[in-house]
Amino acid sequence: MKVVIAMSGGVDSSVAAVLLKREGHKVVGVTMRLMPGGNQTETCAGQVARRLGIPHHVMDFRDIFARRVIDNFCREYSLGRTPNPCVRCNKDIKFGILWERARELGADFIATGHHARVERDGNTGNYLLKKGADKQKDQSYFLCQLDQEQLSRAMFPVGNLTKDKVRQIARKLNLPAAGRPESQEICFIPDDDYPGFLKNHITGDTAPGPIFDREGNTLGQHQGLIYYTVGQRKGLNIAAAEPLYVTSIEPDRNAIIVGNKEQTYGTELVAGNLNWIGIARPEHTIKVKTRIRYRYAEADASVTPLDNDSVYVKFSEPQMAITPGQTVAFYDGDTVIGGGTIMRQGR
């Protein structure tokens, strides 16, 4: 099989390329250029490709990445929502546009370094998205918008390995990324400076406005909705007897609502932009495990379909910082059965 591997220069995609070659596949490395200029990603990925003796291409996706991912990211923030650009990038770019380019190279599959797995259901023939073997590094959450066609051509070579094992393989082969620390940043935001990035990319949507408490009292003034997210504590500049957190954002009033930590918790949400994986859209209430952010613990919940192709999610226990714009993923054991976008807190 001919497999195009998306190479970021990191340890996971580097080892994924190693494993594919060991399995006898014809491997082609591709690094996506997403931001202006060359960078360390391209250099490191090229070094790994040369070490493995595989072809390596740098493909320029800057324009489409800006339109599909960055513009959406900025638009969502301007509307008082907090998007997850990695989920969108996986669906539209890595397993969307990159696949189109991979086919031009004659590829049968596209692979990434995600810690996740794909299996085929022997009864239905559907493709199932599974958690990675290393539950601490599992990245299935970021893939919950992939459809059956995308999963049918996806390979996740490190999905059955722990992160320690991945690094062990990289060290043994003396790969450039073997000891590199993991980045927790969004790739297009330098130094994780959200305010600076948004200020430079959004114009006309940064007007100051009031900060209210839950009773409607004015406590201060915010610097612009784009600089805040639900659950945020720092940067409010309000003197209070106890720490205050953003509990909601109201674009219609250009207002931030704050409360104590207990008031950041909620038990319900409505989600849209739904994608069901390996199952039909539920017609009745189902019980699931739910994750409302990456790194958040899974929580028991019931999911009830609504008339407008959205779902109502009711948690068994209160969850902190239910954030409009974020991705919500639904699990049945190790299997991702669906995902969507949080539209609002409460019903």
Image: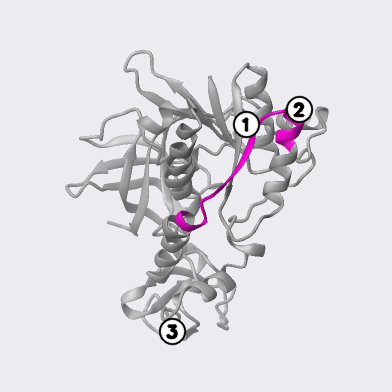
Q: Is residue 292 above or below residue 118?
A: below
| Residue at (25, 35) in percent of width and height | 281
Of mark 2 and mark 3, the one earlier in the sequence is: 2
In the rendered structure, are the residues bearing label 2 and label 1 in contact, judged by CB atoms less than 8 Å apart? no
Secondary structure of residue under mark 3 = loop
In the image, what residue type sits under mark 3? Ala
**Left or right: 163, with 106 as reference point:** right
Q: In this view of the protein, which residue sits in the foreground, 84 or 12?
A: 12
Residue 134: assigned label: 1
Disc 3 from disc 1: Cα separation: 44 Å
Q: Position of residue 326 (x, y in %)?
A: 43, 55
In the image, what residue type sits under mark 1? Asp
Q: In this view of the protein, which residue sits in the foreground, 17 or 233?
A: 17
In the rendered structure, does residue 53 fall within the stretch colored magenta? yes
Q: Mark 3 packing: few (<14 Cα in 10 Å), some, or many (20+)?
A: few
Residue 207: assigned label: 3
In the rendered structure, are the residues bearing label 3 and label 1 in contact, judged by CB atoms less than 8 Å apart? no
- Pick the quarter of the image with the C terminus: bottom left
Q: Which residues are magenta?
A: 48-64
Q: Which residue is disc 2 drawn over?
A: 169
In the image, what residue type sits under mark 2? Ile
The answer to whether residue 339 of the structure is visible from this angle is: yes
In the rendered structure, does residue 270 fall within the stretch colored magenta? no
Q: Position of residue 43 (x, y in %)?
A: 72, 47
